[in-house]
Image (cartoon, rainbow, N blue to C red):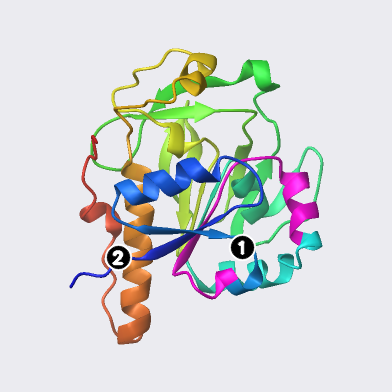
Amino acid sequence: MQSFPVIGVLALQGDYESHALALEQVNAQPKMVRTARDLELVDGLIIPGGESTTFLKLLEREGLFLPLQEFVRMRPTFGTCAGCILLAKRVTHPEQQSLGALDATVERNAYGRQIDSQIVTGATSLPGGPLEMVFIRAPRLIELGSDVEVLAQRDGSPVLVRQKNIMAATFHPELSRAGGMSKNVDEHLSDSEDEHPDRRVHRYFAQVVEEHSRQTRSGPSTAHRHPAQAATNDRE
């Protein structure tokens, strides 16, 4: 019987339910993570969008900051929007505490206020052509370490990156649609029956988690296979 990776979604705030649905659609097993004990039961983790300073307060209140900091250094973790801010080593505009896992500098609210949120289509190295990206009060990756790989860009700036088992996106991949079918954020968010989601980013992360789990079981001699080589253009 085939086993699927158990991928946690940090469920303290933000649109964690949409991430859980996206994981189900790529044959991963989502699990809501609210405690340190929950972290011990998952193979990987998604930190969703929300408000990064609120996340920090909730992590401290629940006693989750230190367990999460240890987790992201050992297991695959994907941060989107606020999650990207939490993962970065350096945060500006203004400076704030972070988990320090991704060798990058991120600028908060780099594209303006909520009303400046928008949907764009940008280049990606994932198979399937340009990727629709929903930016909501988005941060900007303004500096990357030499071992950080850029997987997607917006106007030449990185918006989806990977460093070993860490991934980060400045947009909301749980809201991406196939073919860029929505024109504005308000319309996009109000449409609860999305029949054409683009799940390439979640599929890619699920493959990162699967590969890490396989290497953990087999030991360090397991050959690394880049998940992009096996990713498919998911048009569910």
Question: What residue is at 32 percent from the left and 69 percent from the top?
Answer: 211
Q: Nearer the viewer, residue 224 or 24?
A: 24
For marks 1 and 2, the one nearer the N-term is: 2
Residue range corresponding to the magenta coloring = 38-59
Name above or below for residue 60 compared with residue 139: below
Q: Nearer the viewer, residue 211 or 88?
A: 211
Q: Quadrant of residue 117?
A: top right
| Spot occupied by residue 28 in the image (x, y as percentages of width and height) | 34, 57
**Residue 154 — which label?**
none
**217 relative to 88 in the view: left or right:** left
| Spot occupied by residue 56 in the image (x, y as percentages of width and height) | 76, 53
At label 2, the amino acid type is Phe
Residue 120 within the segment the image draws in magenta:
no
Q: CA distance from mark 1 to mark 2?
A: 26 Å
Residue 49 within the segment the image draws in magenta:
yes
Q: Quadrant of residue 194?
A: top left
Task: Find disc 2 in the rendering and name its residue.
Answer: 4
| Spot occupied by residue 149 in the image (x, y as percentages of width and height) | 43, 52
At label 1, the amino acid type is Ala
Task: Find disc 1 in the rendering and name its residue.
Answer: 101
